[in-house]
Image (cartoon, rainbow, N blue to C red):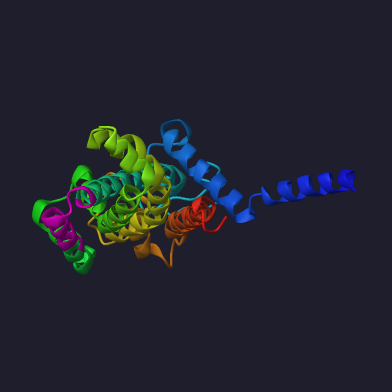
Amino acid sequence: MSGIALPVRLASKGKRRRWPALVVFAIAWLLLMLGVALLADAIAPYAYTALDLRNRLAPPGATMLHPLGTDELGRDVLSRLIFSIRMSLLIAFGATIIGALIGTSLGVLAAHFRGLVEQVVLALVDFSASLPFLILALAVLAFFGNSLTLFICLLGLHAWERYARIARGLVISAGAQGYAAAVRQLGASPWRVYGRHVLPNIASTLIVSMTLAFPEVILLESGLSFLGLGVQPPETSLGSMVGYGREYLTRAPWILLSPAAVIVLTTFSVSVLGDWLRDRLDPTLS
């Protein structure tokens, strides 16, 4: 009986470890997008500003020179798509990291000092959550002009209050547990307590929050670029390609469809991966 039960038990464990098909697809797609972004200069057939006036508005497959067609100026859609992926991922990664750093830092400060500092941080959190971010972005970009650095920093302010709330609650909970109190009683500095003991224990929750906020940043960048307030010519991004392609939706829909499909698949993949990580890292669900 024991010889039969052991293989069955091992088989059940192996079955539990099998990843869902959607998660495998999401990881593969994100790795593909990351590879395209890193190797954009090597794999793009043309520069994203190169013109081919003889093949303007060529549909996909009409010529071997442009597999995804061309736009009104004869620019290769595939090349522009490759460089747009790199630009959009750069903006999304940079903005997500900035928002996580700002929110986590303020959340830790609120949990450590409590009192007046905590009230000020919570007031900032409530104010930021109640302010329509799109209106704020429009006002800042209209007043200060647009640059890539300013644009990334501005998007980094999106949803920072989410990280602040999560970090504050987790740090307060961790500080009440035995390991943090023991290290503090041994004379460890606050930097060591939070940097070596508290933050590593709450990092998984913050990482999941970053994966869930990442699609929001991509969509926000796409929306602002669609309105002409994001990445400015001659630079290109997925949102700016969609904004440019809307003028040729009936005559040349391939200009818009390819970046729109990449936006949908990328945000979907990050959301699937974030949900899966949340389920895997949540001890109450294991």
Magenta residues span: 110-125
- Side (left or right) of 15 relative to 217: right
The residue lying toward the viewer, choosing from 88 and 206, is 206
For residue 101: magenta?
A: no
- Side (left or right) of 266 relative to 12: left
Q: Overall secondary structure of the magenta stretch? A: helix
Whether residue 182 is visible, yes or no, is yes
- Side (left or right) of 72 relative to 285: left
The residue lying toward the viewer, choosing from 137 and 160, is 160
Q: Residue at x 28, y 38 (%)?
A: 184
Whether residue 61 is visible, yes or no, is no
The residue lying toward the viewer, choosing from 48 and 214, is 214
Res. 148 image quadrant: top left
Res. 51 image quadrant: top left
The answer to whether 85 is drawn above or below residue 217 in the figure is above
The residue lying toward the viewer, choosing from 197 and 270, is 197
Q: Residue at x 50, y 46 (%)?
A: 30
Q: Position of residue 74 (x, y in %)?
A: 39, 48
- Side (left or right) of 143 relative to 148: left
The answer to whether 36 is drawn above or below residue 231 in the figure is above
Q: Position of residue 177 (x, y in %)?
A: 36, 48
Q: Residue furthest left?
A: 143
Name the quarter where the C terminus is drawn. bottom right
Q: Residue furthest right?
A: 1
The answer to whether 167 is drawn above or below residue 48 in the figure is below
Number of numbered discs: 0
Q: Residue at x 82, y 49 (%)?
A: 8
Q: Position of residue 40 (x, y in %)?
A: 43, 36
Q: Residue at x 72, y 48 (%)?
A: 13
Q: Position of residue 110 (x, y in %)?
A: 20, 52
